[in-house]
Amino acid sequence: MNKRAEQEAESSKIIHGLVEKVEQHPDNQDVYYQLGSYLTKVKDYVHAEELFKKAISHFDEKNIKADLLVYGLGNVFYEAELYVEAIQAFQKVTDPEMKENAFLMLAQSYMAQESYQQALAFAITAQEINSKNIDTNELIGDIFLALGQFENAAQYYDLVLESDQNHAKANFQRGLVNMVLGLEFDTYFTRSRSANQKYFDAQKKRLSEIEAFIKSRDDR
């Protein structure tokens, strides 16, 4: 059996086990979420969407809030690059314990559409709930970078690096910011390369693009 066939067999086994859990515990939202999340992970978006919608309907009939499943449905849409539908789903999440994640996913959905101001508003709201969340601070840095607000981007990448000094992406992005601002950047690129050589190599093209941008700017 080749590797792909082995992976498919393993995946089928996992799905079968999760389906059995759902059948055994039809009123447990967690088991639906586990199955739907796994289907999303293996990119079976059609069945994942179908599962979450049926599960949400099941709990709606019992007048039971199903924010976890609504959030799961939003993730399906996001991974399938259906960002309008994802936004609609995440906006329905009202559970206070899930609001931070929902706001972050709303921000990522708007970011994917290049709607940077909307993305920033939701990302800042998520950051106000948890100022130490690395994913949120990284995203805010990315948004400010996309907006050309380099000093603000640096501030949030620095927050990421306070939590994880060897964060490959944050070091690379921080280096880009300093390159544009005409400040020392080698330290950040060295850390990024040491943390994840493969990631750094994949991003190298951006360095030459930034260098060309700076040269054209200085030649004016």
Image (spheres, grey):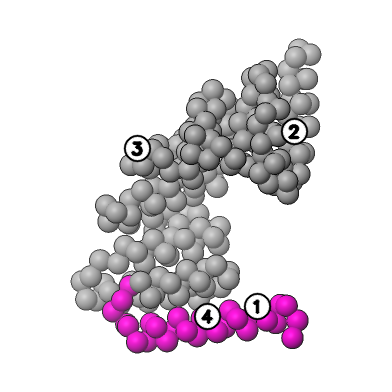
Q: Label 4, secondary structure: give it.
A: helix
Q: Label 1, secondary structure: give it.
A: helix
Q: Quadrant of residue 177?
A: top right
Q: Answer with left or right where residue 181 lies relative to residue 139.
A: right
- Looking at the image, is mark 3 or mark 4 earlier in the sequence? 4
Disc 1 residue type? Gln
Residue at 57% across, 25% down: 150
Disc 3 residue type? Glu
Mark 1 is surrounded, within 10 Å at the Cα level, by few (under 14), some (14 to 19) or many (20 or more) other residues, namely: few
Pointer 2: what residue? Answer: 207
State whether residue 29 is above or below residue 164.
Answer: below
Pointer 3: what residue? Answer: 128
Pointer 4: what residue? Answer: 14
Residue 48 in percent (x, y) is at 48, 72
Residue 180 in percent (x, y) is at 67, 23
Dominant secondary-structure state across the stretch colored magenta: helix
Residue at 38% across, 82% down: 22
Distance Cα–Cα, label 3 vs label 1: 41 Å
State whether residue 154 is above or below residue 64.
Answer: above
State whether residue 214 is above or below residue 1.
Answer: above
Q: Nearer the viewer, residue 105 or 169?
A: 169
* In contact (CB < 8 Å): disc 2 and disc 3: no
Pointer 1: what residue? Answer: 7
* In contact (CB < 8 Å): disc 4 and disc 2: no
Residue 140 in percent (x, y) is at 49, 37
